[in-house]
Amino acid sequence: FELEVKFASGVQDHYAIQGLVVEQDPGNFIRFDFFGNTATTDIFAAQFVDGTPSIQVNAPITNAGVAPLYMRVRRLGNQWTQSYSLDGQSWIAAPSFTRALTVNSVGIFAANADVTPAHTAVVDYFFSRAAPIVPEDGTVGTTLTTSTIGNGTITATPDQAVYNCADSVSLTAVADPGWVFTGWDGDITETDNPVVVPMADDLLVTATFQQVTTQNTLLYLSSTTNGVVDGVSFRDEDIVVYDTEGDSWSLFFDGSDVGVISDVDAFDFLADGSLLFSLAGDTTVPGLGSVDDSDIVRFIPTSWGPTTSGSFEFYFDGSDVGLTLSGEDIIAIAALDNGSFLASFIGNPSVPGLTAKDEDLLLFTPTQLGVNTIGTWSLYFDGSDVGFDELYYEDIYATWADGATGAVHLAARGVYNVPGLSGDEDDVFVCTPGIFGPTTTCSFSLEWDGDLYGFGSEDIDGIAWGEPTAVASRFDSTQPAAATEDATASGPDEIDSSRDDDDGEQWSIFLPAIMR
């Protein structure tokens, strides 16, 4: 008979051993192997008679650690010949020797000697030359069939008609706008996206997408400048709201009423209806004192609209978590349901653990908020991965995260051009995710164009969607603020010079109950 084995592993360590054993019984056998001998790989054979060894072959053949290593052992009568190859094509025979042996078993083994580290042998194949595996590395020919339920697509990487048994495929589900991926079915039942699957067998895989029914009808906006929309005057420290059902505009947050005199350049609402905002420059806020453009302030309202009132508290101190440079002004924020938030910056921020660009979104995960802020940063959205350029006018200028769909809503600093969509600074557009993180994929769609609703002359620097809920149901103005850094705010009695006196106009005041 003749045996053949291919070791995919080399023998790097001194006396690391891998080979074949041909056995009559535990005391009578022949050992054929490769072993590491400091700088070389040696071929070796020894026969054992009643437990006593006798070396038959011992010679260096190549450098230590070389792989793969091939070996053949042939028996012709009582003559034994050991051969080796480094490529499986050219074979070199070691000296033959004679041994009468009643063979009862053969097999592969791995070993180490004395204090040598344990050796792991990797065996590609082992067979009798009388019944070889042909072809040794043949194609199994497994196939992948995908389908979808709902509106979305599946991408496979690599994408091919037939796979080998050793192949793996990465599957990514990409939901269409207004839909969200909910999970995989068929031969894999996961919710991870993307998911990596081994192609050991034919696979049938289905991605399920669910349509999102959103009830958001109110779009909250802030601008970089003072302006007028549909007869409603506003300043850059204000927030206006557009009612998409009633096609009407109103003033929602009057910054001057509560002493805010700097541009509100980022905002979002918490689930309790309070307002988070950041300011375009270093300034003071009544009761809080100095506030940096890398800080976030929380406003707890007692009333909204043309007579805004409420109290302030420090929510986030950027200098506590690495925001200390002039280019690290927060320019966009989006509050998430779990208490973390997304942020983008006027420049390229460098925070503990990472650096980013002004077209990126960072995720801040807090362990403590307030005047002593503690937490960690991670990259949530890499703008360069999805077509945002290094040019300043493709910087992210506003964002809002939809917890129901996972989508990120965006506004750009100026004219933008991303895959499948282009527009300008008065647009709100949506990134429906494939993947968020250091490798970002998404599909873009236009959500709202300010040119169509009288906002075309503005540069949007804050966005949020929400639903109306009566203020009285959320806030009791007779209750004192609980936080130690709260400060009741009120502004000057006079009306902004850019705004007419609204005395006599009837106002309906609403509080945003954000749909996440």
Image: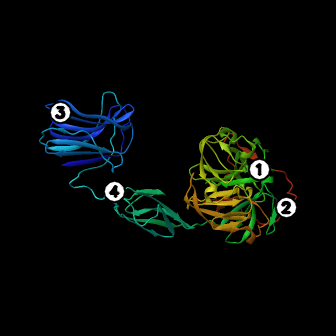
Nearer the camera: disc 4 or disc 1:
4
Q: Which residue is mark 1?
A: 280
| Amino acid type at image mark 2 | Arg
Check whether the beta carbons of the residues at disc 3 and disc 1 lie within 8 A of each other: no
**Distance between mark 4 and mark 3 Cα atoms:** 35 Å
Question: Badge 4: how crowded within 10 Å, few (<14), some, or many (20+)?
Answer: few
N-terminal of the pair, mark 4 or mark 3, is 3
**Distance between mark 2 and mark 1 Cα atoms:** 22 Å
* Residue 163, image quadrant: bottom left
Nearer the camera: disc 4 or disc 3:
3
Q: Which residue is mark 2?
A: 499
479 versus 515 height, above or below: above
**Distance between mark 4 and mark 2 Cα atoms:** 79 Å
Q: Which residue is mark 4?
A: 137
Report the front residue among 246 and 387: 387
Check whether the beta carbons of the residues at disc 2 and disc 3 lie within 8 A of each other: no
